[in-house]
């Protein structure tokens, strides 16, 4: 609860009364006594006992009458300032293990308040009376309690320290000092500590995250830094993890978090370890370490558990395992046959130069008319082609040219800087000129493609407004290609073009033109047999056996799925050769 000005004033008043009681009345009493002495001297002088004493007395008493009230006021002000300084929070230090504790201290590092953030913290603090004690004493007591109760140990040795100070430089010094001191304390308890420390300001955003996930603002700040650096990590997943696991993730990703100091190594003694994870993966794959290449092992967090990701290649086949870091159980497994991305023999392909000539010829340019001309051979899941890119005028061109036949598979033409924005709203309106009609947009697209209305099918046009960019999207097909144009709704300028070779539609079972099964494909049943044989099961041992024929950009295969023993299996079987292209095995 925030304190009002009146409450603060009352606190200072009480502090003053406690620190300088009865000072002013005593001063007034002294002044009054001196006045009485002065009066008596005056009477005596008038009775003939000499004027010298009176004058001498007046010389020394006159300054005292002036200075006494000033001194009293100064004492009051000094007392008020000292009381306020002692009550003012200079820094808030948070300690997170899984217990979460905050200490608020003044500029003399005296504890003003100790606050428990969760049930574990209440157990750690017990009946400690920390208010008014030195910060170092409080830290010693809390760390000792955490060790005695098993929150800090060789199995779980990480602690997060977060300093929120009104003095930025002083906060950094305090962060570094506490990190050293706690490390020394843990050494005294025979625990090799791993200290994560940071400075942070508890702004509204961090406070909201802390409330939402039931964590401290210090932990919220650390997770904000980590997820910003690695967006693949989900905030809600990390919030449930203890600091030791978060520290392991930071180390595993070699993450450099600005403003965060990490000393020591987080303990992984609670997990099976990288060597055991590798051994489990190798046993399952039936290989030895000297047979594989490109081996990588990383501790990660997925689907609510810490896992070791083990990846390696056997020839051109990629293996990818997720192994539960605590139990050693394989929770996910994938195999992918990567094939090769380099043409085996140039004579089998048209070559990069020929692909460039085809693209330039289609676009109507010579080599001297374009810039940044580049071509690259690509092999994507059996689809081999050349990607040709170049710039001309204010447009980027990108072509995909079949590496064997030279057929244009796809075209993208995009304006480098898009046209001026048009109006907002769901319907087109005029803006500084006449809006072109949808039919005019269609005519412009067809003219650019060199086609007439009678030569195309599925002609569709839609007006679009995306963040102030207003245009017509025109789509149509001819016998060989699918076209998509973006036409500026005011100027009629072509903003973007995509042309892609038409594919025969995906079917549940491939057929020839006459409708009979194409003998070049192995068939659904044979694909299932191959998948089951590889997995080591019979049909009666599995459930939910399903198979689907698929054609993705020229890659034809059967997708076979089934369940067995708590796992879900998915195979991709080449529809022509019967080769296993990919395997996935995952806990159901």
Image (tube, grey):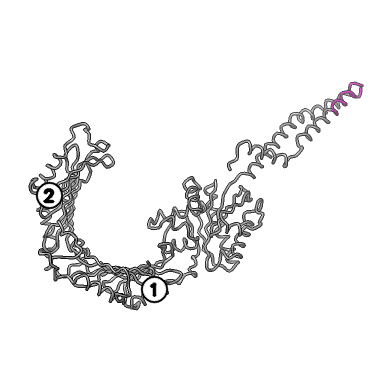
From mark 2 to mark 1, how far is it between C-alphas?
56 Å
Q: Say what secondary structure mark 2 lies in.
A: strand
Circle 1 packing at 10 Å, graded few (<14), some (14-19), many (20+), is many
Does 39 lie within the magenta span? yes
Mark earlier in primary sequence (2, 1): 1
Q: In this rendering, is residue 287 above or below 228?
A: below
| Residue at image mark 2 | 457
Q: In this rendering, is residue 207 above or below 24?
A: below
Give the percent coordinates (x, y) of residue 354.
Answer: 11, 60
Name the residue at 52% across, 68% down.
155
Name the residue at 61% across, 59% down.
123
Q: Nearer the viewer, mark 2 or mark 1?
A: 2
Left or right of 100 on screen, residue 431? left
Left or right of 174 on screen, residue 304? left
Label for residue 278?
A: 1
Quadrant of the frame with the N terminus:
top right
Q: In this rendering, is residue 57 above or below 285?
A: above
Q: Say what secondary structure mark 1 lies in.
A: helix
Circle 2 packing at 10 Å, graded few (<14), some (14-19), many (20+), is few
Q: In this rendering, is residue 54 above or below 146?
A: above
For the residue pair 239 and 200, the one nearer the viewer reads as 239
Query: Which picture quadrant has residue 513?
Result: bottom left
For the residue pair 76 and 211, the one nearer the viewer reads as 211
Most prominent secondary structure in the magenta stretch? helix
Left or right of 405 on screen, residue 66? right
Residue 253 seen in this snapshot: no
Quadrant of the frame with the C terminus:
bottom left
Query: Which picture quadrant has residue 316?
Result: bottom left
- In the image, which residues are magenta? 36-49
Q: Are marks 2 and 1 in contact (CB under 8 Å)?
A: no
Give the percent coordinates (x, y) of residue 251.
Answer: 44, 63
């Amino acid at each position: 609860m925030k304190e009002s000005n009146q409450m603060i004033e009352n606190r200072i008043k009480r502090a003053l009364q406690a620190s300088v009681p009865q000072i002013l009345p005593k001063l007034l009493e002294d002044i009054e006594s001196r006045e009485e002495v002065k009066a008596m001297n005056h009477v005596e002088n008038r009775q003939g006992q000499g004027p010298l004493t009176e004058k001498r007395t007046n010389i020394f008493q006159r300054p005292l009458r002036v200075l006494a009230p000033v001194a009293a006021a100064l004492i009051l002000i000094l007392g008020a300032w000292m009381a306020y300084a002692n009550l003012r929070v200079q820094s808030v230090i948070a300690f997170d293990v899984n217990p979460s504790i905050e200490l608020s201290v003044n500029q003399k590092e005296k504890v003003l308040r100790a606050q428990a953030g969760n049930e574990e913290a209440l157990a750690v603090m017990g009946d400690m009376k920390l208010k008014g004690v030195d910060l170092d004493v409080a830290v010693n007591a809390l760390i000792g309690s955490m060790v005695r109760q098993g929150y800090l140990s060789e199995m779980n040795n990480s602690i997060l320290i977060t300093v929120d100070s009104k003095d930025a430089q002083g906060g950094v010094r305090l962060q570094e000092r506490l990190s050293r001191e706690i490390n020394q304390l843990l050494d005294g308890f025979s625990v090799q500590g791993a200290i994560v420390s940071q400075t942070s300001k508890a702004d509204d955003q961090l406070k909201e995250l802390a409330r939402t996930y039931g964590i401290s603002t210090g932990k919220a700040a650390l997770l904000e830094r980590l997820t910003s650096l690695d967006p693949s990590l989900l905030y809600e997943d990390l919030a449930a993890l203890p600091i030791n696991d978060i520290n392991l993730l930071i180390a595993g990703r070699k993450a450099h978090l600005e403003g965060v100091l990490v000393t020591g190594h987080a303990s992984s003694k609670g997990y099976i370890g990288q060597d055991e994870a590798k051994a489990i993966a190798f046993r399952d794959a039936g290989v030895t370490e000297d047979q594989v290449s490109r081996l990588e092992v990383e501790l990660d967090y997925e689907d609510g558990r810490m896992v070791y990701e083990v990846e390696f290649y056997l020839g051109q086949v990629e293996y990818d395992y997720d192994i539960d870091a605590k139990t050693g159980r394989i929770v996910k497994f994938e195999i992918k046959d990567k094939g090769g991305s380099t043409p085996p023999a140039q004579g089998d392909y048209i070559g990069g130069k020929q692909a460039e000539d085809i693209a330039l010829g289609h676009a109507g340019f010579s080599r001297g008319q374009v810039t940044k001309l580049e071509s690259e051979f690509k092999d994507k899941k059996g689809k081999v082609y050349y990607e040709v890119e170049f710039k001309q005028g204010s447009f980027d061109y990108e072509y995909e040219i079949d590496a064997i036949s030279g057929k244009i598979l796809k075209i993208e033409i995009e304006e480098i800087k898009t046209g001026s924005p048009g109006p907002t709203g769901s319907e087109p309106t005029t803006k500084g000129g006449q809006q072109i009609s949808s039919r005019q947009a269609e005519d412009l697209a067809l003219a650019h493609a060199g086609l007439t209305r009678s030569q195309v099918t599925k002609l569709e046009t839609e007006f679009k407004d995306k963040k102030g960019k207003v245009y017509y999207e025109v789509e149509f097909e001819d016998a060989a290609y699918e076209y998509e144009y973006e036409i500026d709704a005011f100027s009629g300028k072509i903003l973007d073009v995509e042309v892609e070779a038409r594919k025969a539609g995906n079917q549940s079972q491939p057929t020839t033109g006459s409708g009979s099964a194409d003998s070049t494909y192995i068939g659904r049943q044979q694909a299932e047999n191959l998948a089951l044989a590889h997995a080591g099961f019979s049909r009666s041992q599995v459930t939910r056996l399903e198979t689907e024929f698929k054609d993705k950009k020229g890659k034809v295969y059967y997708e076979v799925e089934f369940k067995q023993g708590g796992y879900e299996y998915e195979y991709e079987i080449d529809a022509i050769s019967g080769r296993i292209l990919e395997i996935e095995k995952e806990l159901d």
